[in-house]
Image: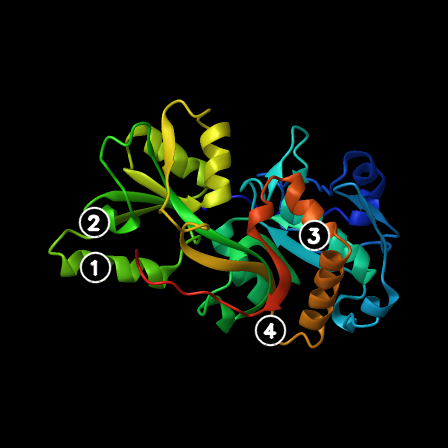
């Protein structure tokens, strides 16, 4: 669902605790398009406390004891903004959003500093494989292909809807209705197996294949529909509703969703992506996430962004969902 962006300047949560206490959420500097890749993700001190969604989060010694040596000096987190309400930039080009708040709260529970970078969504997994980051918080869906290289601690369930022109002049009522039409997506942010099944369905019906147009950012795909360069956009349900309001103000676009499906098409569990092979990291993050769920912080974060209905009450590890075409 991103424009080419270089690696940005890293900022430790230790440096923003005072700011987050005032605004109720974590933030970090946005990357500059002219900034060279950073050489280090080190941070000077572990956070003592942070206010997230009106709740004071403090370190948990039992959870901190689970932290592997590899990240005791700090966690390097990667995201891909803008993808509201999960990650966006505020008016000062600081990172904000549900994933940012969650990552900052997790770091405090673990008793380690956290640093953030926002990069192209399509480049996240290769960068994690290259050892540049310790975890992904970018509304990333857990699926079988991604589990080959990442482990996921799942905290949300999200599906997809379509964005079409106001009044739906083409009468698009479903994802399989896109045969022979142009579908805009954010690069790297769709389930290839699901799309492959759609193409097979198109062929079985004797129809032309769906034309998939990959664009750098979710907002770019919105504009492609608005301009007529695409017939529809395929986008996560929460982000679609946000962008139709913020990018378009609801005057020329609308969403199409499946009836009777709470999460939309192709629902996926969404999680914190972790590189395989770092012993203890998954257990530590799961313990921290369960702690945030138990004390109400997780629910408060989701409520802050108006998406309580997509929260997983009991976090799980590596549990991809699969649903047939509809």
Report the residue at 19% width, 56% height from top.
202
- In three-dimensional space, the C-alpha distance between marks 2 and 1, rounded to whole angstroms, equals 9 Å
Question: Which of the two discs, 3 and 1, sits closer to the camera?
Answer: 3
In percent of width and height, residue 134 lies at: 66, 63
In percent of width and height, residue 70 lies at: 75, 70
Report the residue at 23% width, 58% height from top.
199
Report the residue at 75% width, 66% height from top.
71
Q: Earlier in the sequence, mark 4 or mark 3?
A: 4
- In three-dimensional space, the C-alpha distance between marks 2 and 4, rounded to whole angstroms, equals 37 Å
- 107 left or right of 199? right
Q: Earlier in the sequence, mark 3 or mark 1?
A: 1
Q: Quick check: can you spot residue 42? A: no
In percent of width and height, residue 89 lies at: 62, 36
Residue marked by disc 4: 276
Residue marked by disc 2: 179
Label pair 2/1, CB-CB below 8 angstroms = yes
Label pair 4/1, CB-CB below 8 angstroms = no
Residue marked by disc 1: 201
Secondary structure state at the residue bearing disc 3: helix
Q: Work out which quarter of the rendered image holds the C terminus and state it.
A: bottom left
Question: Which of the two discs, 2 and 4, sits closer to the camera?
Answer: 2
Report the residue at 55% width, 40% height from top.
84
Secondary structure state at the residue bearing disc 2: loop
- In three-dimensional space, the C-alpha distance between marks 4 and 1, rounded to whole angstroms, equals 35 Å
- In three-dimensional space, the C-alpha distance between marks 3 and 1, rounded to whole angstroms, equals 39 Å
- 246 left or right of 110? left
Residue marked by disc 3: 298
Q: How is the image coloured?
A: rainbow
- In three-dimensional space, the C-alpha distance between marks 4 and 3, rounded to whole angstroms, equals 25 Å
Badge 3, how many Cα within 10 Å: few under 14, some, many 20+?
many
């Amino acid at each position: 669902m991103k424009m080419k962006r270089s690696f940005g300047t890293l900022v430790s949560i230790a440096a923003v605790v005072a700011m987050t206490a005032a605004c109720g959420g974590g933030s970090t500097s946005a990357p500059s398009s002219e900034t060279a890749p950073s050489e280090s993700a080190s941070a000077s001190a572990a956070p003592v406390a942070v206010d997230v969604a009106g709740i004071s989060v403090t370190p948990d010694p039992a959870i901190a004891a689970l932290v592997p040596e590899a990240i005791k000096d700090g966690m390097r987190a990667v995201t891909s903004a803008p993808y509201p309400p999960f990650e966006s930039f505020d008016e000062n080009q600081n990172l904000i959003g549900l994933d940012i708040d969650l990552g900052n709260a997790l770091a405090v529970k673990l008793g380690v500093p956290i640093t953030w970078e926002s990069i192209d969504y399509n480049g996240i997994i290769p960068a994690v494989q290259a050892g540049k980051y310790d975890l992904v918080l970018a509304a990333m869906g857990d699926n079988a292909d991604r589990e080959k290289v990442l482990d996921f601690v799942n905290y949300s369930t999200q599906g997809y809807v379509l964005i079409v022109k106001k009044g739906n002049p083409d009468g698009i009522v479903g994802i399989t209705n896109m045969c022979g039409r142009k579908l805009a997506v954010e690069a790297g942010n769709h389930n290839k197996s699901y799309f492959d099944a759609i193409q097979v369905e198109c062929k079985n019906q004797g129809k032309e294949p769906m034309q998939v147009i990959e664009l750098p950012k979710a907002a770019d795909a919105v504009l492609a529909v608005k301009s007529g360069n695409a017939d529809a956009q395929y986008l996560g349900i929460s982000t679609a509703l946000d962008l139709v309001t913020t990018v378009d103000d609801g005057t020329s676009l609308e969403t199409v969703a499946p009836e009777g499906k709470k999460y939309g098409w192709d629902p996926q569990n969404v999680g914190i992506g972790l590189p395989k092979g770092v012993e203890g990291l998954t257990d530590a993050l799961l313990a921290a996430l369960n702690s945030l769920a138990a004390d109400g912080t997780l629910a408060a974060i989701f409520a802050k962004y108006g998406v309580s209905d997509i929260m997983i009450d009991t976090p799980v590890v590596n549990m991809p969902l699969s649903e047939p075409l509809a």
